[in-house]
Image: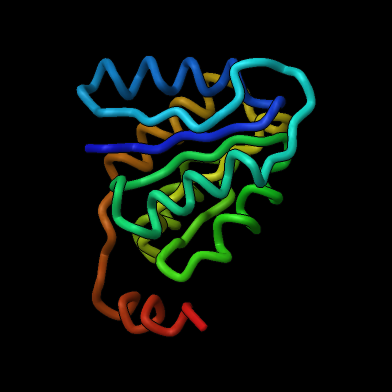
């Protein structure tokens, strides 16, 4: 699977651990995030990830910032993106099963690195249920 990842200054350490996991599992990773904790603007990293997902250049995306709200808001401006903000594996399961989310948004200031890695694992392994949920997905884009 081809995966885009992006982060602001709140998430470099998270990103590196997630990239390690993804590469270990054989995924191709495109890193759009910053590698330092120097202050940056989250849209500069969320937009390339969302654009890659929106245009089908990658299969899924992962975005990390302090609260994950900013990256989720930015990513969800794209018509083919369904970005979900999650802080537990249970929420991750639901955004995949019910919303067919294609970008996982992780709040670095409200999760630990092990939690974030576990959420990415859940995101990768949880399928979309389809059925009644597809009708709702079809109504999301404006």
At which x and y percent is residue 101?
Answer: 41, 57
With respect to residue 138, does 12 lie above or below? above
Which of the 4 quarters of the picture holds residue 119?
top left
Seen from the viewer's position, the closer of residues 20 and 78 is 78
Residue at x-position 56% and y-position 56%: 75
Q: Residue 60 in the image: x percent, y percent?
A: 35, 46
Where residue 122 sits, quadrant-wise, is top left
Residue 90 relative to residue 26: left or right: right
Quadrant of image for the N terminus: top left
All told, the count of numbered labels is 0
Report the colour scheme: rainbow
Question: Which residue is drawn at the image coordinates 41% and 34% (left, top)?
Answer: 120
Q: Is residue 74 above or below residue 22?
A: below
The residue at 44%/61% (across/down) is 81
Above or below for 79 versus 132: above
| Residue at horizontal 74 percent and vertical 38 percent from the top | 41
**Residue 125 image point, x, y percent:** 27, 41
Please, which residue is most extreme toward the right here?
Answer: 39
């Amino acid at each position: 699977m081809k995966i885009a990842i992006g982060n602001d200054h709140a998430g470099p350490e998270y990103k590196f651990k997630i990239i390690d996991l993804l590469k270990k599992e054989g995924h191709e990773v495109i890193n759009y995030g910053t590698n330092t904790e120097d202050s940056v603007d989250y849209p500069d990293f969320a937009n390339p990830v969302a654009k890659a997902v929106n245009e089908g250049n990658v299969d899924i995306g992962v975005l990390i910032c302090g609260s994950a709200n900013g990256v989720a808001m930015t990513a969800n401006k794209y018509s083919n993106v369904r970005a979900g903000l999650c802080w537990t594996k249970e929420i991750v399961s639901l955004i995949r099963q019910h919303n067919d989310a294609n970008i996982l948004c992780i709040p670095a200031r409200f999760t630990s690195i092990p939690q974030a890695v576990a959420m990415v694992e859940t995101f990768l392994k949880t399928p979309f249920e389809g059925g009644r949920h597809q009708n709702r997905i079809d109504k999301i884009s404006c």
